[in-house]
Amino acid sequence: MNFGAPDQVYGALAAFGLGTALALVATEKKFPVGPASAKNLGYDHQEIDALLDLGCGPGMDSILAARRARPKGKVIGVDMCEEMLAKAQRNAQAVGLANIEFRQGSAQ
């Protein structure tokens, strides 16, 4: 799908009275993400021994961490919502991970 050049998109949005939103988008600074950003923050890319994921939701970050865990490494995802924990458990089972578990609890 082609939305046209950025100036055409901004012009179309401005025509709908979204000038304030355009100003925010134009001045927004991107939050650094990815391996280079993690390294700049002092995190290396070694394998994981243990990880606690508070507010794990459907478990996607927990699953990614479990894939990077050492052979005896463990990942525990914690969420307060039973539905999210059930979804996280299904997601982990779907990708065949045994080094991950999910528990109900609060981060407080």
Image (tube, rainbow, N blue to C red):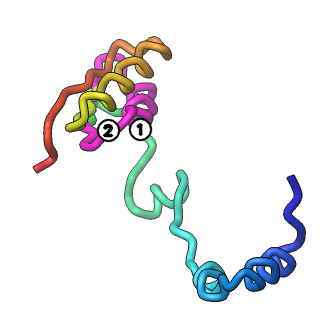
- The answer to which quarter of the image holds residue 97 is top left
Query: Which residue lies at the image location 57% right of the left edge and 79% below the top edge?
Result: 28
User: Which of label 2 and label 1 is nearer to you?
Assistant: 2
Task: Specify the amino acid type for callout 2.
Answer: Cys
- The answer to which quarter of the image holds residue 6 is bottom right
Q: Which of 11 and 46 is in front in this view?
A: 11
Q: Report if the CB atoms under discs 2 and 1 are less than 8 Å apart.
A: yes
Q: What stretch is highlighted in magenta?
A: 52-74
- Against 98, is 59 above or below? below
- Say left or right for 23 vs 72: right
- Residue 43: where, in percent of width, then height? 39, 53
Question: Residue lying farthest front?
Answer: 16
- Residue count near mark 2 (Cα–Cα under 10 Å), binned few <14, some 14–19, many ≥20: many
- Say left or right for 98 vs 52: right
- Against 80, is 86 above or below? above
- Residue count near mark 1 (Cα–Cα under 10 Å), binned few <14, some 14–19, many ≥20: some
Task: Specify the amino acid type for callout 1.
Answer: Asp
Query: Which residue lies at the image location 27% right of the left edge and 35% below the top edge?
Result: 51
Query: Which residue lies at the image location 72% right of the left edge and 80% below the top edge?
Result: 16
Residue corresponding to mark 2: 56
The reply to whether the magenta stretch includes residue 68 is: yes
- Against 95, is 17 above or below? below
- Say left or right for 56 vs 68: left
- Residue 21: where, in percent of width, then height? 60, 81
Residue corresponding to mark 1: 61
